[in-house]
Image (cartoon, helix red, strand yellow):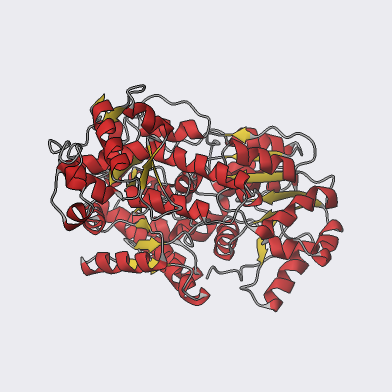
Amino acid sequence: MADLSLSLSGPGSGAPPAAGKHAALRDTFGFDAFRPGQEEVVDRLIAGRHALVVMPTGAGKSLCFQVPALVRGGLTVVVSPLVALMQNQVAALRLAGVAAGTINSSLSREDNVATWRAAAAGRLALLYMSPERLMTGRMLAALARLPLSMIVIDEAHCISQWGHSFRPEYEALTGLAGVFPGVPLAAFTATADTVTREDIAGRLFPGRVDPIVAGFDRPNIRLAVSPKADVKKQLLDFVRERAGRCGVVYCLSRRRAEEMAAVLAGAGHKALAYHAGLDAGARRVLLDRFLTEPGIVMTATIAFGMGIDKPDVRYVVHVDLPATVEAYYQELGRAGRDGAPADAALFYGLDDIRMRRRFIEDSGAGEDRKRVDRRRLDALLAYCEAVECRRGALLSYFGERADACGNCDVCLDPPTVTDGTEAARQAVEAVVGTGERFGAAHIVDVLTGRATDKIARFRHDVLAVHGAGSGRKPEVWRSILRQLVASHVLEVDVGGHGGLRTTARGRDILAGRQGIRIREETPRRAAGRKTVRPDATGDAARADPALLRDLKELRLALARERGVPPYVVFHDATLIELAVVRPADRDAFAEVRGVGAAKLARFGDAFLAVIARYR
């Protein structure tokens, strides 16, 4: 647990309210300039205007409201969904010299009361709370008596019922504008398509608010999708290529997460399983290990979700198809937050499509919601089956255009696309001829002419299409069937037994009224295997490995003393620059990116002592 016992005394921030945005950025956080997209948000909030901000994970959205909070003075309330995230952000702010606090259920009543008294006395710049803590009559009345400067809602997509992770407790936040009519509201999310953005704006803000969309691209993450074969072997091969590096493996179920952790641990990897079936204490221990120990591979369900802020996650793997493009984008965004090269790999097959369609139909949602969910699943399948730049397919979903990225499997190993009309006609004929009630495995057996008991029992060996596709291997036919489902030539009968059936487009192909192009399935590299190792690029290649290792060991020791993740002390980029520049004194140390005044005073001498041994 983060150390929340640091002093709450002081004027409320590491920079006086009158300080400008650049002074706050430099003196408190140790940065000379804003990242692309940040300054527009900062300026709007300093001016006291509402803001809905969509900014990719790792782009520095926290600074976008932390800097205005210091410049404007008064108290900024930050709403966050996760205790661990709140505590880590508060710990990071305090180490930077900012008086910040959190009121949450994991702290004692005495600690929460002390934090509230500090806020009421004007000794806090930022106060973090969960929506449940904030939206009580007593808390709202108490805050109304304070000089409230701004209210920030993090993970704002949780407000929208059209988003991928709607949370009922967030819905009450839609009343904030009425309770605090003169206070600017700022809503931040990394993941919101057009429908979700419009819903957030309409529900949260009075009148019109123009969203600031800072882009969705994460160019340092290499994207790859592979058809499922032996997914355990595929995962082992993938992780083996990245042995000793931190990663996250997303699984559909608790059982699957534990199974994959066991497979990886059996191969010698430090793998842990995280899911909602564990009690809160066990999850807290696992999260602490993930954040502080190097080389952990966390196999997890979506319970391992928002607020997992670890900069050096080198890969995210999905061994099951996620629910939507939004969910996938947020989950792959756990990788490469430090800007160094990272991988996002997805394994999927026809069973994943059948399962996801069944989830939609059995959800109990209204028809409008089901229609949106079907459309979102179709968009995800289009991403999986992309024959042109995969990043372009992903970004187009969020309304962005992109040229070929050169950093996805499709760009690096372009597929061959051919006229697939005849293959599609044979597949549709096999589906129709067998009664539109059999799954992909049986259809492949029919097309390749196998003599199975099932084929003999149903006399499918007398069909004209039996063996018509024997010139293609079974794995090629499986790929074709998957593409035909993604293209709505065939569909999975989720209302029946999960068999394949034809669609209007399939009947048009069978009648010769339409054609289709398909991707030829050829042996491909394991997803993402061409990734450049992060420590072999840029400044890291110029750093003395022994010095960098000692700096990381010191950082880990300091972090453990304070009960915070290592990146809260300094990010890897700061340590790499220290190892390259090797400052000899505090003045030179202060020039390193990410070193603010408070961290210089707190940690400078210890790091300078390590560096001195290498000078």
Depicted 56 relative to depicted 291: above or below: above
Q: Residue at x 79, y 52 (%)?
A: 175
Along the line of sight, the residue nearer the viewer: 585 or 338: 338
Along the line of sight, the residue nearer the viewer: 559 or 176: 176
Q: Is residue 453 left or right of residue 251?
A: left
Depicted 468 relative to depicted 607: above or below: above
Depicted 450 relative to depicted 502: above or below: below
> At which x and y percent is residue 554?
38, 63
> At which x and y percent is residue 581?
36, 43
Q: In this view of the protein, can residue 102 be seen by the observer?
A: yes
Along the line of sight, the residue nearer the viewer: 361 or 266: 361
Q: In this view of the protein, can residue 585 be seen by the observer?
A: no
> At which x and y percent is residue 245?
30, 56
Q: Residue at x 30, y 42 (%)?
A: 431
Name the residue furthest top: 513
Along the line of sight, the residue nearer the viewer: 427 or 553: 427
Give residue 430's quadrant in the image: top left
**Exactly how many numbered labels are in the figure?**
0
> At which x and y percent is residue 213?
59, 34
Q: Is residue 133 left or right of residue 291?
A: right
Give residue 546's quadrant in the image: bottom left
